[in-house]
Image (cartoon, helix red, strand yellow):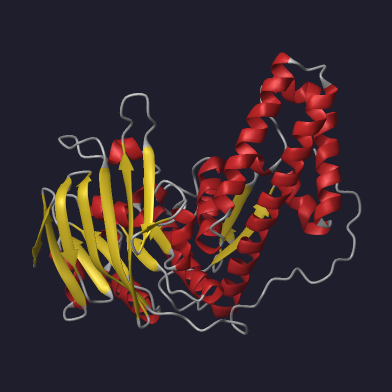
Amino acid sequence: MIEVVSPITQESSGIVDPSTDEPSVVGLRLTRVICRDFRNHADLDLAVGSRFVALVGENGAGKTNLLESISLFCPGRGLRRADLSSMARNAGSGGFAVSLALKQGEDEHRIGTGFEPAVGDGRATRLCRIDGETVGSPVAFSEFLRVVWLTPDLDGLFRGPAGDRRRFLDRLVLAVDATHGARVNALERALRSRNRLLEERPSDGQWLDAVEREVAELGVAVALARRETAERLDRLIAETRDDAQPFPWAGLRLEGDLDDLVAVWPALEAEDRFRAALRQGRHRDRAAGRTLVGPQATDLVVRHGPKDVAAATASTGEQKALLIGLVLAHARLVQAMCGIAPIILLDEVAAHLDPRRRAGLFDALAALQGQVWMTGADPALFVELDGRADMVSVSDGRIVRA
């Protein structure tokens, strides 16, 4: 356990109130999606123009694959968290390419990403381009668009293990801070190095001191980024909550030794205390085979606001509604913090809602400024969007206008 001791009086956290310091929002639309050898899409070219895009088709038709192709334009591995090599079409060359045309205010841009498999002694390559120019990583796309999503894989979030909620939390942070993923990856590498040293060279104090200094610096940076985003989101939810809405508001807090530490101590002091805890815990961590304290032990604790109960104890339907409300609030936060209305990807969300909540979802999405992409097996799910949405039928990797 990390010793927090007595808290000190802190200056303002530096968190900007989105309701009072919101930048002007840039309207953003995807106008074209092109997929070559991506999943089951051999050669797809889809042009759209509406704020709502409804993808309709049977299971396995390729609807979610289209959403996944869009999700690749933000840091990370997309909404399925899959390896790039697994995204290439089975009957294809082993690689793939995805391109988006987007309109941002009066400006138009073309961004692209793809995967080239290893040839001979070479290495597999991830390619990223903006307006024809090669860029170093998907982080560069964040200047042009932000993406948030909700998929059926998140349905068990509140009842599942803490690791699932940490990954969800990191996705929330990534949407507003594109560099967060690099910090998390660097922290994971440093933790692996420490665990290996404890196993193979436990008496090498000099190397352990060095790697623990790196773990402390990265760990505090990760914890602070998570805390800032969680606090901003919790504040926005509290200030805009409406008990009459079909999606209940959520209360958020972070639980963990390091989270308690960064809540009351400045960053440098928190690093010193975390590093001391790592040093004192070497014997215990060696026996456990892993580092037991730090941001890798954080949990995102969510409560059902109107009922004031833990989200995990709510009914399945209440949890689903709570999660939708949380994602909608996150989209508002991204818009407020970044000045870019995010692209919202909703995979098979409307099918699990009763008519009242489905209508409430469409109203809430209409109140946002971002473009919304949705999937569903039944066209009747989107009848309330008639005249407002591009209706696209997807069948075996091909598209047909509905």
Could you tell me residue 160's position as x and y percent?
Answer: 49, 42
Is 70 left or right of 308, judged from the image as shown? left
Could you tell me residue 20's position as x and y percent?
Answer: 62, 85
Give the residue displayed 50% in from the left and 66% down from the top.
330
In this rendered view, identify the residue nearer to me: 222 or 316.
Answer: 222
Q: Find residue 102 and report its image quarter.
A: bottom left
Is 371 left or right of 53, judged from the image as shown? right
In this rendered view, identify the residue nearer to me: 277 or 348.
Answer: 277
Q: Find residue 399 and report its image quarter.
A: bottom left
Is 54 left or right of 257, judged from the image as shown? left
Residue 6 in view of the camera: yes
Name the image quarter holding the C terminus: bottom left
Could you tell me residue 223's position as x and y percent?
Answer: 68, 51
Give the residue displayed 55% in from the left and 49% down from the top.
181
Q: Can you name the residue that lies furthest to the top here?
A: 200
Number of callouts: 0
Q: Find residue 207 and report its image quarter.
A: top right
Give the residue displayed 22% in from the left and 43% down from the top.
39
